[in-house]
Image (cartoon, coloured by chain):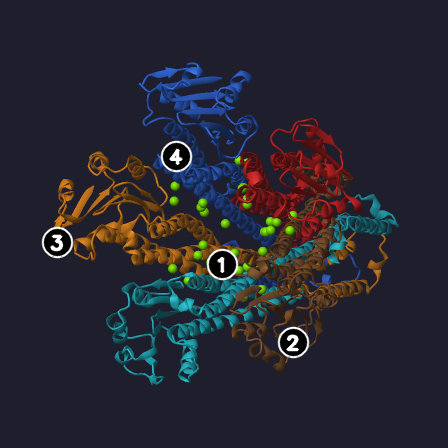
Chain colours: A red, B blue, C brown, D orange, E cyan
Amino acid sequence: MIRSMGMTKKGVMLNDVDVQRLMMPDMKWYWVDMEAPDVDEASLMAGVFKFHSLAIEDCFNDLQRPKIDSYASHNFFVLHALNKKTLEAEEVDCFVGKNFLVTVHMNESPGINKLWTQVQGGSLKGDGAAILFYRVVDQLVDEYFPILYRMEDRLDHIEDNVNSKSYGSLIDEVFNIRSQLLHIRRTVLPMRDLLYRMLNLESLSHIQAHKAYFRDIHDHLLKLTELVESSREMTSDMRDSYQTINSNRMNQIMMTLTIVSTIFIPLTFIAGVYGMNFAYMPELQTSYGYFVALIVMALITIIMLWHFKRKGWFDIFK
Amino acid sequence: MIRSMGMTKKGVMLNDVDVQRLMMPDMKWYWVDMEAPDVDEASLMAGVFKFHSLAIEDCFNDLQRPKIDSYASHNFFVLHALNKKTLEAEEVDCFVGKNFLVTVHMNESPGINKLWTQVQGGSLKGDGAAILFYRVVDQLVDEYFPILYRMEDRLDHIEDNVNSKSYGSLIDEVFNIRSQLLHIRRTVLPMRDLLYRMLNLESLSHIQAHKAYFRDIHDHLLKLTELVESSREMTSDMRDSYQTINSNRMNQIMMTLTIVSTIFIPLTFIAGVYGMNFAYMPELQTSYGYFVALIVMALITIIMLWHFKRKGWFDIFK
Amino acid sequence: MIRSMGMTKKGVMLNDVDVQRLMMPDMKWYWVDMEAPDVDEASLMAGVFKFHSLAIEDCFNDLQRPKIDSYASHNFFVLHALNKKTLEAEEVDCFVGKNFLVTVHMNESPGINKLWTQVQGGSLKGDGAAILFYRVVDQLVDEYFPILYRMEDRLDHIEDNVNSKSYGSLIDEVFNIRSQLLHIRRTVLPMRDLLYRMLNLESLSHIQAHKAYFRDIHDHLLKLTELVESSREMTSDMRDSYQTINSNRMNQIMMTLTIVSTIFIPLTFIAGVYGMNFAYMPELQTSYGYFVALIVMALITIIMLWHFKRKGWFDIFK
Amino acid sequence: MIRSMGMTKKGVMLNDVDVQRLMMPDMKWYWVDMEAPDVDEASLMAGVFKFHSLAIEDCFNDLQRPKIDSYASHNFFVLHALNKKTLEAEEVDCFVGKNFLVTVHMNESPGINKLWTQVQGGSLKGDGAAILFYRVVDQLVDEYFPILYRMEDRLDHIEDNVNSKSYGSLIDEVFNIRSQLLHIRRTVLPMRDLLYRMLNLESLSHIQAHKAYFRDIHDHLLKLTELVESSREMTSDMRDSYQTINSNRMNQIMMTLTIVSTIFIPLTFIAGVYGMNFAYMPELQTSYGYFVALIVMALITIIMLWHFKRKGWFDIFK
Amino acid sequence: MIRSMGMTKKGVMLNDVDVQRLMMPDMKWYWVDMEAPDVDEASLMAGVFKFHSLAIEDCFNDLQRPKIDSYASHNFFVLHALNKKTLEAEEVDCFVGKNFLVTVHMNESPGINKLWTQVQGGSLKGDGAAILFYRVVDQLVDEYFPILYRMEDRLDHIEDNVNSKSYGSLIDEVFNIRSQLLHIRRTVLPMRDLLYRMLNLESLSHIQAHKAYFRDIHDHLLKLTELVESSREMTSDMRDSYQTINSNRMNQIMMTLTIVSTIFIPLTFIAGVYGMNFAYMPELQTSYGYFVALIVMALITIIMLWHFKRKGWFDIFK
Ligand SMILES: [Mg+2]
Ligand SMILES: [Mg+2]
Ligand SMILES: [Mg+2]
Ligand SMILES: [Mg+2]
Ligand SMILES: [Mg+2]
Ligand SMILES: [Mg+2]
Ligand SMILES: [Mg+2]
Ligand SMILES: [Mg+2]
Ligand SMILES: [Mg+2]
Ligand SMILES: [Mg+2]
Ligand SMILES: [Mg+2]
Ligand SMILES: [Mg+2]
Ligand SMILES: [Mg+2]
Ligand SMILES: [Mg+2]
Ligand SMILES: [Mg+2]
Ligand SMILES: [Mg+2]
Ligand SMILES: [Mg+2]
Ligand SMILES: [Mg+2]
Ligand SMILES: [Mg+2]
Ligand SMILES: [Mg+2]
Ligand SMILES: [Mg+2]
Ligand SMILES: [Mg+2]
Ligand SMILES: [Mg+2]
Ligand SMILES: [Mg+2]
Ligand SMILES: [Mg+2]
Ligand SMILES: [Mg+2]
Ligand SMILES: [Mg+2]
Ligand SMILES: [Mg+2]
Ligand SMILES: [Mg+2]
Ligand SMILES: [Mg+2]
Ligand SMILES: [Mg+2]
């Protein structure tokens, strides 16, 4: 699918006209958007726009890292959108020239669609391709925030439940979020580095002229980096904290077993001894033998409980 | 809420006069403070002060990272205050011009209030906006110290109790402090980087003229960074140390259970054997059988205790 | 084994001609490939090509790190191929001059073979040695991708099975992949640094003239680095997650043992007491004694189960 | 307490003379040392020496990080001494001018005292304030070494005892040393950075003239950094190694319990069955029943031992 | 011990002649080697060679970090040799001048001895002191390789045995190697940094003239750094893998104990109940009571086994 729009120097808006028309000298700016271009549409890139073959190759290869390549007549940018549902990175490629922007993407891009409608509605202020390109980058990066805020909220919620019973079932989600953050980081970090390069490459005179706008996006990406990094640290802290809770609970369980066992096992042994059927066992014949045995058992229990208390073994249950 | 003060070149102090008055050429300096500005007040920024739209946007958006943006007629600074109770970062935005300071914040700021009273009382030395701005930054950063000192004290206190019984209940607090430090770091680190940039940006001629003062704040922030980082390392060391204590205790518990069990289980078995009701069990009929059984049991106990001792199993209780 | 090809300035392709012929001034470019060179072939390097003795030494020594050494008449590059089967790095050494490329490798190189056939088939566009060298580097680096994609797929597959029963048997493979990634990193990171140096060394005028092509390889290596690093992080996250699963399961096991033991051990003790053979045990003679004993046992069981439930011990099995 | 000494250009040594005398133009160099200065003495700094108010403030505030502040007539250095007993950092502030050194410290400083005596004894070679200042820094840094060597020795000693019985009681000390190293690092790292800055600040012409001497201190601090870092790594390795030992021991303990229990529990059950008092139990009445039961028990034991051996469970005790 | 050799400009080799002779202007180059110099020999350094006092001090102090100090008439290098047996670093100090090399070391150095013999045998190519110094550095660094290759081989061997029975006894060696690597790193990393500085210091004109040779050593040190770092990572991976194996084994042990206990403890309780001696226990008097009891016990066993199987508890033994 291919669509186009442009504005003449006289301020007339053109919609979905022929590419040849757009390349005429009376255009102030134009924007061509290709979604999953077919062979004919793709051939425009090399044939009409004269884009560099390595850049075209990158459009059709699998996911590239965000980057900038400068060629004689145009700059080529690889950007990442984040898919709201799958959280996967999706490539949006931009060719930016003096008065044009060509965007290429294999998947439908809600961000591009939204922006297309806005620009058609006349929302574009400023003098053309550079500010148009700013709007694209800004739109894509703005879409990262709700995804990361949702993750941060989820982590905050889990952290509030650290000591609750249901924490065990929450730890799986912590690992999930940690894994998703690792993937998102592969979009956010290179995008941040890309914006930093844009701001510092003298050769990008278009961008230099609108530095304040691109610096604003760079600020966003710095904040996003911080969000990703500190959210990942949060997950590792939560994992450690869960491990401590688990190990405390294990101590309590084993303490219970040990106290019960070490008290009753000797008592059961004594009972076993006097349950033996030897013909000659003098204690059995006395009338007070049974009571003496019970008293001895009670004494052993008391001594053991006192011993455990003195060693502080009951403190673990507090 | 909006309030203002200023000093004329003749040294007359003006309080809460109209903004138009402050912008007259006879002012040496003036300070306008906006707390949670309403629509009218906010419109002053673009309409009267002619601040850049991206900067105004940052004031009303949620928490920005500390940063500096330079525009033609003013510099825009995002600063962070730390709320003493919630420990949350709160944004304080500063527009600094040749002879003015405009501060904007959404929450009540105790630091700004305190400083406002001091400056009204005539405590401002030096020639105007730059030194006024220094006082704002200094005030906000000074308020970080008591928060971090309290955390450090708390950690020192917990560390002193590592081997006490109550340590188990303290480890939760360690995780809490660790989590709070992670949040505070997101204020302290970018503030430190901001001060570093201030000191090294040639374009900030106002600040360059008072370098010693801003360097002093930078020193504070270096010290705060160190406090945050080493406190976080302290928490991870305490967590590891707690894990070791826990695992030692577990070893002691299981050792107790194992010693008691392995001694009594065989004895109880022997007692069980002679408690069987088989018609023909020759040992049962002898007059010394019972005593032989008791002696055998005693021997087994002694051999086992000696075996455990030789393997060093009792050392664990030391 | 030694083989050669070249093209004269008039566009005639020569195959496996004498090295002396190739060095005549009418050659546009030529390529000499040595696989496990014997003594005679090796002597060409010093004797005919006049390569530097340190560079020749590196060819015959064990695995060198990827690097570049510049000499008067030629540049010397150490590259790494990754063996698809063993995943071991294999050295491919390149001497690049104004109009020649000499490749030296001790093992058979499928990548070099494939490229040799392509170039013989006339696929070489551009003006000679630099573009030929580009093709070699590109070929070797392209072969890294399937290896890393396979590892990533394997890890994704294992991650999907984290909670399944068979996870225990998968963790061994995680450690294997982690170990292989450590080895592969020793190829990918220095190769990335090498490409970065190539792009920034002013003295490499050949490469500077084809910067876009070598930048493309550098992009690939940045992406590979990211793949290696995030795959390694994935393995450590999976290890931590497995540890948590293991420790949860241990808690369940011990909980089961403890509940069963602490309920039955006291009951068995009571049964043992009334199994004693003392002559005078008043409870035994009553007609209701047995039933009272059974009721007491039932009560103890109920109280214990209620106690465990109140402490939330059954939650662990959810 | 304040004390002073100085040397006139004619080589006459003055001791504890008035500060005004020292500031006369005929002095080659002079040194004023203030220990916990009272109000009168402190007022000299601003009143007579004209030191910058921010620098004076730092002297009286709590512990500052090591740093350098350059003012018009003097440089201000914050240095750290390490207290041999408490291992706490103690601030030593130095004002260094063309021909003077003023040292300020709140605690008694054994290093300053020692140096004072030496210089009074005429040990000062070279032309004055810069070399005097070098002696101060050198003295303070030299005192770090015995502290760190003692820690390293202690760690080496503990490492030699990793497998001994008493290791458990040594691990506490490892955590202590780790915590102390964290504190010492906060002195050593900033001191190293300070010396690096001294060596590279062109404006410090005094120091540049004696670069070899300050470089020597910088070497010491590089070595100290390495000592701190690798000692900290040693402690984390020892902690991990202790955890492994602990977990091995736990495995041995549980293995013992499991082997004894799983062998005797079924046997005891069999004994229990034939201890039941049912009226009709045919096995009980035969004359060989008892012996068959004993043989069955022996067989069960042998089979179990063989099964455990085949599974390698006894290997754990090796 | 002191020894010397030198070559006159006419190409005459001198052996063990007087130091004064060597300093005459007709010498092309000379080398003086001091092993554990006595007071007389040491006095040559300051008295005859006029070396800087700080450099001489470093020779006699304990182990310095590898470094370079430049003085007017000579450069001073601290190098490290690794002792093959103790793996300890041993300092080799080099004074390098226009036409001389003076080496000083406190221990016998096999590397220096080997090189001395070679040079005496006439193996020195090139024009003197710089190439002689290159030979020394090269010799010392070449000796690092066998040590690290041995460690890497040992680790590879242990890794191949991860799942074998004897792994437990191998983990101690892993910790040993890890500790040795930590020590060796303190030699390799500063040596690498030293070579990097040599290559980039313009003032070292001798070395700049033989850059290819020193770059070769730098390559070696980069490879050694990689070996040390990835070997250390290997040890930490092996430690984690061992922990997982240990914890799996613990799970198996406890599972065995729990299954056996939870099955037999209730059965033994039932047997205990019918072993009680109450006068009135109706079940005991029936002729089928015993068989009913046995059947109930069998049913309990079957239900429990089925329950455990359904919960997947037997999977752990696979
Ligand atoms: Mg990417
Ligand atoms: Mg931001
Ligand atoms: Mg970051
Ligand atoms: Mg960050
Ligand atoms: Mg962070
Ligand atoms: Mg962390
Ligand atoms: Mg922030
Ligand atoms: Mg500080
Ligand atoms: Mg720090
Ligand atoms: Mg820091
Ligand atoms: Mg720290
Ligand atoms: Mg740490
Ligand atoms: Mg390598
Ligand atoms: Mg890439
Ligand atoms: Mg990376
Ligand atoms: Mg990367
Ligand atoms: Mg990553
Ligand atoms: Mg990680
Ligand atoms: Mg752990
Ligand atoms: Mg400090
Ligand atoms: Mg050092
Ligand atoms: Mg370090
Ligand atoms: Mg270091
Ligand atoms: Mg180290
Ligand atoms: Mg470590
Ligand atoms: Mg060292
Ligand atoms: Mg190398
Ligand atoms: Mg390295
Ligand atoms: Mg490395
Ligand atoms: Mg590595
Ligand atoms: Mg690792």
Q: Secondary structure at mark 3?
A: loop
Relative depth, front residue between C238 and C115 = C115
Q: Is residue E252 visible?
A: no
Chain that bears disc 2: C
Measured Cα–Cα span from mark 2 to mark 3 = 78 Å
Measured Cα–Cα span from mark 2 to mark 4 = 66 Å
Q: Earlier in the sequence, mark 1 or mark 3?
A: 3
Instruction: Check chain identity for marks 4 and 3: say if they share one.
Output: no
Measured Cα–Cα span from mark 1 to mark 4 = 62 Å
Instruction: Check chain identity for marks 2 and 3: say if they share one.
Output: no
Q: Amino acid at mark 2?
A: Ala
Question: In the image as oriented, which residue stretches furthest toward the top?
Answer: B17
> Looking at the rendering, which quadrant does residue C204 occupy?
bottom right
View quadrant of ligand 2: top right
Instruction: Check chain identity for marks 1 and 4: say if they share one.
Output: no
The answer to whether residue C54 is left or right of residue D260 is: left
Provide the residue designation for mark 2. C36
Q: Secondary structure at mark 2?
A: loop
Instruction: Check chain identity for marks 1 and 3: say if they share one.
Output: yes
Mark 1: C-beta under 8 Å from nearest atom of ligand 19 = no
Mark 4: C-beta under 8 Å from nearest atom of ligand 8 = no
